Amino acid sequence: MNKLFFVLLTSFLLFNSVGAFAKETADIKQSEVSIKLPNVQMIRQDGKKVQFADDINDGRVVVVSFIYTSCSAICPMISQTIARLQGKLGAEIDKVHLVSISLDPEHDTPKQLAAYAEKFHAGKSWQHYTGTEEASIAIQKAMDVYRGDKMNHVPVTFLKAGKGDKWVRLDGFVTADDILRVVHDL
Amino acid sequence: MLNFWLRIWLCLLVTAHLPTVAFAAMSDLEAGRRIYMEGVLPSDTLLKGFRGEDEVSGKQAACAACHRPSGMGSVEGDIQVPPITGNYLYRTGDSLQVTMDPRSGKRFNIAHEPYTDAAVGKAIREGVNISDQHMNVLMPHYTLSNDELRAVTVYLKQLSQHYSPGVTKDEVHFATVITPDADPEKRRMLLRVLERGFTQKNGSTMLGGKRSGRRHMVTAAELVLGTERKWVLHVWNLQGAPETWQQQLQEFNQKEPVFALLSGLSGTTWQPVHTFCEKSHIPCWLPTVDLPEDAGENIYSIYFQRGVKLEADVLAKFVADEPQKAPKRIVQIYRANALGLGASEELSAAFKDSGTTIENRTLTGDMPALRKALEGLGEQDLVMLWLSATDLSMLNAISPSKANVYVSGRMSGGEKLALVDNWKQNIKMIYPYELPEKRQLNLNYFHSWMRFNQIPIEDEPLQAEAYFALDFMSDTMTEMLDNVYRDYLLERAESMLSRNETGKTEQRDRVRQVMRWSTRVPRTVKQETTASDGAVKQDGDTVQALGKSTTIYPRMSLGIGQRFASKGAYIVRFDDVTKNKLVPLSAWIVP
């Protein structure tokens, strides 16, 4: 009896711990947040200077991600996902504003960002933003993604339906389908 | 008839085996290197991998993209990319610790059972590691033939297998290169800082993990693993024409191989040294130069900033941002050496499409030549003087120009430029450092070190650069533990520079606040200063300000493939009252 119990307990524990590692870490945490964005000046990859908060408050659905061009691991995945999303949106892309903000603005000049955007076939609804170090940090802090250094960044995506300051925050490696699901829910 | 079909059959036979034929022509090592570094298979097709449903191919799919050229892995966000050199995978190395996440200080790579070649195959093809876990979604699943897999394992087994040249269990050798055209005074100052630093470091280094007698703190890891080494400094004085420098460097390195070039000094060109580093795969670490090499691929040299070329680009941006004040003509005056030519070419290129006329006047001779070069210039002209402090001092015998005159902060000696007042009141400067008063707090520790070692501050940018080259090398080597490989040194510099700077300044601020220390306005500054919160303080007042860097630069940062740590400059002029203080005319401009 004891032996059986022991075997059952061990296999119970074993299967649990194996299970914990066996899944690929694609768990996403979804939350709703209210964000007051600073209206700092930013520059787009096409060189256009904008007031940031105003620029992403024109009534379109907004999808915000954070990248930097010399990033090798996380950013290519994030940008690939946004590229996929761009494709899946098809004609609906006109109602959506895809926003990628640079975490390394001093290195990521508009020219640098344009080359990066080109790699992922960014269309006219997908803008990459840079500016001063202070401006980028102000936006990161307002959105609660500031982690002290660009290389500490973790994948986070924000979605907003139309104007206002209510956002959905998705922590983790989202897929294009995940984003679409949330967009349609909004 | 038979011949025809025989031929067809033979052709098919050959083409079916072409990939293998291609493979046979290439060694396993080379095939493995191409897969690892470039994401190209022996058949010349791109390596393909899948992350979930997303395909990556080519360079983005290459192992080096995340595991890095050294194979030592990396950390991004909360994701650890582990080391995969043969020493680590197969656990054949002596030391098996890699500092992964220095934010937590003691987070090392996760130990695991030794891999076998078959297990490596399973990891690469199925994404399951030796501990039978599915790896992070970032690790792609690849399709590799058995031959291709074998090539990869052959490559991994020799990757970063031994210490780099210039490194033994107990010692690491560095060289500082001084070009023959370097200013003798600057040479003296630079070497004094470096020699003092090496002596001090070695004075308290305990080798082989000995605990007793240790007189300075090291990290817990260094203490336990005994990875501190004695540093040996070689001074390589170059002679003669630049065309002969590469040869001299090769001879120096042949006689006494070094791990890296540390700091260094040049008067005009640095290009032959840069090329030597690229060809010999030797890291060239933060030399003090006015004209770094910024063209072409640069893997092995990291620089503080782009020197006079950066200044040229900053000036161009400053002018372009105010089109209503645009000059009709830009006149550049410079000596026809590598430095003057490099700077003027950069400025010319920056204004190429602007419609502004650029006129270049080379200076050959002394004061009369300079006076002549300044003739015929008026208020509509912008004059850029790419001249040293010595040359600029000749202006004192010349009546001030009516034109908009700019000088190079780097070449002129910055705030120490000694000119008569009526020149100073109109001159503007491109200044690639943090403003002198603002940076005093950042340089607190540097100043303490200089005082303690009884070295007077004669040229703050130069001495601070030499000190930082030492300090940052020391920090980076500490983190590397026993993994002393050249590629890894550069990879850690890329990822750690800005993190270290932020970490240190935050830590020092905390110390200040905990001890309730505040920082007096330095005694040498005998005029009004503006603290970071905008309040104006007088000399002697205490100023609580937050430093943002530990160097003369407001911010230093690198990243994968980035080679210039500071990326901007101010435009400044001299103040009206004392004529010794620099007053900013712009924000920090990043071109």
Image (cartoon, coloured by chain):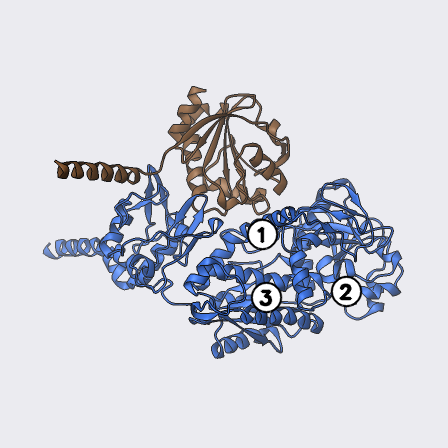
Chain colours: A brown, B blue
Q: Residue at x 67, y 56 (%)?
A: B443
Marked residue nearer the N-terminal end (1 or 2): 2
Q: Residue furthest left?
A: B2
Q: Mark yes or no: residue B308 visible.
A: yes
Left or right placement of residue A185 versus residue B309 in this view: left
Left or right placement of residue B220 versus residue B435 in this view: left
**Amino acid type indicated by mark 3:** Ser
For the residue pair A6 and B30, the one nearer the viewer reads as A6
**Amino acid type indicated by mark 2:** Ala
The residue marked by circle 2 belongs to what chain?
Answer: B
Disc on res. B504: 1
Q: Quadrant of the N terminus of chain B?
A: bottom left
Residue picked out by circle 2: B389
Disc on res. B263: 3
Marked residue nearer the N-terminal end (3 or 1): 3
Q: Residue at x 37, y 49 (%)?
A: B58
Q: Residue at x 76, y 52 (%)?
A: B521
Give the CA separation, mark 3 to mark 1: 21 Å
The residue marked by circle 1 belongs to what chain?
Answer: B
User: Percent x, y for residue A87?
Assistant: 41, 31
Element at badge 1?
A: helix
